[in-house]
Image (cartoon, rainbow, N blue to C red):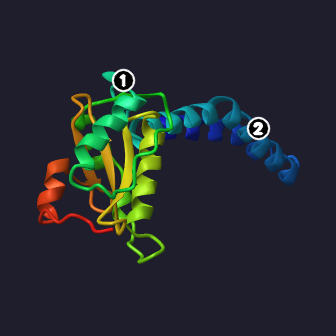
Amino acid sequence: MKKLILSLVLALSLATPVFAMEKPINSWTKCINAFHEMYETFIAPCDREWIQYIYNKYGKPEPAKIVGGIDGDVLIDIITETIDSEFPYTTRWVKSDKVYRLTTIEEMKRFLEFDDTNELEYIPEYRDCDDFARLLRARVERWTPGLAFGYIHIKGGSHAVNIFVDVNYDVWYIEPGTDYIKPWDYLLVSMGNRRPTR
């Protein structure tokens, strides 16, 4: 339909100057100017609205459904209790907000399905685990600001993962290079219950 309207506008714009054939160059110039003015007035706004609609609908996921909040000090206590008992030498979560927003694990998985951080090329030293973890943290913040989502270093500081606290106060870990997401206890199994050394 849009193409049909565009064709009719072009045909009407061209009809008079082409058949009159009074000064071909001036007629074409007037024709093009008239078409450009009509396009900018009637069609371009619709195109821009359509492009914005498509971007809003498909270019990014809907923000997470916020279903609670948690005091920053309480969040630190939960993370410390969950992680430090097995990984006492991990890099601590740095509290940067007084209150964090909470959502469900299903919402986080929905975001990870959309996000393409895990598809980026791995480059030793320059784009490795800590870079992936920081990038995923930034993208989550852009998606829904203020979530209880961050990253820490484990294995004596030699590996970085993202951590997420859901509305049930469960702590999840995410491998940012693969989107592998499991409850924190699974990390112990995957490491063979090895504790990092100083």
| Residue that extends furthest to the front in the rendered view of this protein | 198
Circle 1 Cα neighbour tier, 10 Å, few/some/many (<14 / 14–19 / ≥20): some
Query: Label 1's element?
Result: strand
- Image quarter of residue 12: top right
Between 93 and 175, the residue placed more toward the observer is: 93
- The residue carrying mark 2 is 34
- Image quarter of residue 188: bottom left
Q: Residue at x 48, y 41 (%)?
A: 142
In percent of width and height, residue 79 lies at: 30, 41
- Circles 1 and 2, Cβ within 8 Å, touching? The answer is no
Between 105 and 79, the residue placed more toward the observer is: 79
Evaluate whether residue 116 shows in this view.
no
- The residue carrying mark 1 is 69
| Residue type at the position of mark 1 | Gly
First in sequence, mark 1 or 2: give its number: 2
Q: Residue at x 23, y 43 (%)?
A: 82
Looking at the figure, which quarter contains the C terminus? bottom left
